[in-house]
Amino acid sequence: MLILAGGFGTRLRSVVSDVPKPLAPVAGRPFLYYLIESWIRQGATKLTLLLHHEAPLVEKFCSAAQRAGLWRDCQFRTLVEPTPLGTGGAVAYAVQQLRLTGSFLVANADTWIGSGVREISAAAPPSIATIQVQNTERYGRMRIDGRRVMAFEEKQASEGPGWINAGLYHLHANYFTEWDGCPFSLEGEIFPALASNGELSAVPLKTDFIDIGIPDDYFRFCRWIETDRRDSLCI
């Protein structure tokens, strides 16, 4: 599984300024700790963290966790982008550097999803996990017909309940073999093109979900963890 963990976390910087977003503190532990615990519990055995912004801090956390004996049944590695490449460029760089040839999973390092790894693994690539929220305005809406993604609506044109990108994907290396080395976006370029061609499948999930990219939702996740996850975590 490739983990997109290289972003700058600009919107969260007003409350988390001393560490990159994946290391945002939650009840005394980095947010990434809870993600890794969840991914392993769902069956992940190999994780590759795609890094850029403050990469040494994330690498230090992973090394310390391994020295402490955490997650011994999971293989870890990191890959640092030489420059910011966007979500698509980060994946393309990983495909190139790691010589990936088959299909693989991709997950966001700022998004908590209570389940989905097994479901997305079972779906043929290209596929995207989706979740229903009360208001799509912050995320943009996905238009779905059955299990087929038809189109993506921009954030500015989206509001009210609907399906959104849950930040978990099953992709194939073939989509990235002709990469020109320039930054680009999975969300803005790859996924809309696949949907337009009728190739992108949706994997609906019913589970806890939150994107900690803004302070309010980051604090919501902190409270959820501190209260032992007693309530459902959905937007």
Image (tube, rainbow, N blue to C red):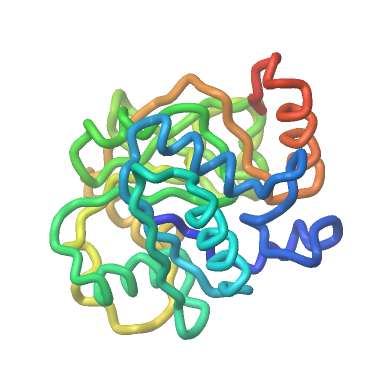
Residue 178 drawn at (x, y percent): 20, 76
Is 65 on the left-hand or right-hand side of 3? right
The residue at 68%/45% (across/down) is 212
Is 123 on the left-hand or right-hand side of 61? left
Nearest the viewer among 143 and 109 is 109
Residue 29 drawn at (x, y percent): 69, 45
Answer with the quarter of the image where residue 187 lies: bottom left
Above or below, comparing residue 81 to residue 22 in the picture: below
Q: How many marks?
A: 0
The residue at 32%/27% (across/down) is 145
Is 26 on the left-hand or right-hand side of 153? right
Residue 92 drawn at (x, y percent): 31, 70
Nearest the viewer among 131 and 99 is 99
Which residue appears farthest toward the top when viewing the image?
Answer: 230
Is 170 on the left-hand or right-hand side of 113? left
Answer with the quarter of the image where residue 186 lies: bottom left
Nearest the viewer among 186 and 34 is 34
Q: What is the quadrant of the C terminus in the image?
A: top right
Above or below, comparing residue 144 to residue 219 in the picture: above
Residue 152 drawn at (x, y percent): 45, 45
Which residue appears farthest toward the right when viewing the image?
Answer: 14
Above or below, comparing residue 160 to residue 212 in the picture: above
The residue at 75%/59% (across/down) is 11
Answer with the quarter of the image where residue 8 lies: bottom right
The residue at 28%/33% (across/down) is 148
